[in-house]
Amino acid sequence: MELFIFLASPIFATLSSLSIIYSIRFLDAIEREPLKPIIAAFAWGIASAIAILIFPFSIGNYIINTLDLDPNLNEVFGTIIDAPIKEEIYKFIGLFFVFKTFKKEFHSLTDFVVYSCLVAAGFQFIENIIYLWGTLGYENDITYYWNMQLTGRVIESGYMHALFTAWSGVGLWFYKKSTKIKLNFLFFVLIAIGLHFFNNLSSVFSSFESSNSIAAINYLGNISYAITRALSIALFITLIGFSVIRDINYLNFFIFEIHDQNLLEKPQLQTLKVLSNPIYHLLARYKWSWRLFKLHKTSPVSRDIFNSFSKYALSYSDEYINYEKKERKIILSNAINLISNVST
């Protein structure tokens, strides 16, 4: 059984990470990110997890020593205080390196959220393996404890790091957009730390044995853990929805700009109408989603055209701050030519 756990743990951790990566990439409705920076973001997430093991620091130990508290509280303080602060800071550092290396790929808010989630997935990949392999240290009931970690951490909570670190991505987006004050990103990093803190605090409380003396704490932990998880998911869905709507707004603005040129005839206007459907743009991200809804048979515009048009739309937006008026005119002209070629 030990050999099975040793070999199977990385496989399950990989499947968990891949599911997160694939899901997050699918939500990038306008511009699907290239593979190279995606791999780099995942690798930096792994590096940030390894960096914690190599360069540890403990605020919890400092508090215990300063206040002369019970040393047995070290593990509790490590989970509640050290983990949220250290992990979110190291993940943000990893995200920042990805941003500096692939700055040209960081455009809209959605991109920042996507890459922050990819860093989180890499971090959680290492963390999942460590916890799964950690069950090999038990003398009895190894299979039971491994199943507990597999179901509780890898399957049920495999996405939690992404819910936290996504807000660091928002902070980095504000950092990029800010012209004067660059410290406003710290507020969003603190949100990531705060959500992580309340998640861990609730988890610790709910793990206390439900004896008469601490039954209330155990109950409070279970309730607060459910609330914290629900709140983290709700905030993440709101963030994703807001960022995708922003991208769709760029698409609509670009379509209006093309329409206002008054250069399109009736067949071309029909093509433009089809290209204005944001659901089609979302489903055009992958071949399987395009074919699943049989759009390869029903759509008058091919999947590749949707992808090309969406890139023009985002390139025309304010997120590409380096583009001048002449370059925008070229993008507009290229999009009109694309529509004309499709409509002929």
Image (spheres, rainbow, N blue to C red):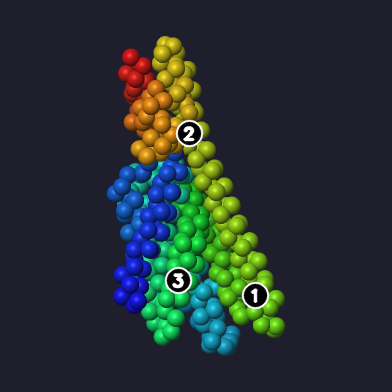
Pointer 1 or 3: first along the chain? 3
Q: CA distance from mark 1 to mark 2?
A: 45 Å
Residue shown at 41% from the left, 25% from the top? 298
Residue 163 in view? yes
Pointer 2 or 3: first along the chain? 3
Q: CA distance from mark 2 to mark 3?
A: 39 Å
> Is label 2 in a helix, a strand or a loop?
helix
Q: Are marks 1 and 2 in contact (CB under 8 Å)?
A: no
Amino acid residing under circle 2: Ile
Q: Report the side of 189 relative to 97 (left or right).
A: right
Pointer 1 or 2: first along the chain? 1
| Picture quadrant where residue 41 is located | bottom left
Expressed as whole percent of the image width and height from the top left, the position of residue 32 reads 38, 41
Residue receiving disc 1 = 218
The quarter of the rendered structure image containing the C terminus is top left
Residue shown at 60% from the left, 57% from the top? 230
Residue shown at 44% from the left, 64% from the top? 154
Residue receiving disc 2 = 279
> Is label 3 in a helix, a strand or a loop?
helix
Q: Residue furthest left?
A: 36
Q: CA distance from mark 1 to mark 3?
A: 23 Å
- Mark 3, other Cα within 10 Å: few <14 / some 14–19 / many ≥20: some
Is 250 placed above or below 112 here?
A: above
Q: Which is in the foreground here, disc 2 or disc 3? A: 3
Expressed as whole percent of the image width and height from the top left, the position of residue 34 reads 32, 44
- Mark 2, other Cα within 10 Å: few <14 / some 14–19 / many ≥20: few
Expressed as whole percent of the image width and height from the top left, the position of residue 251 reads 46, 31
Amino acid residing under circle 3: Asn
Residue receiving disc 3 = 147
**Nearer-the-camera pick, 226 or 242:** 226
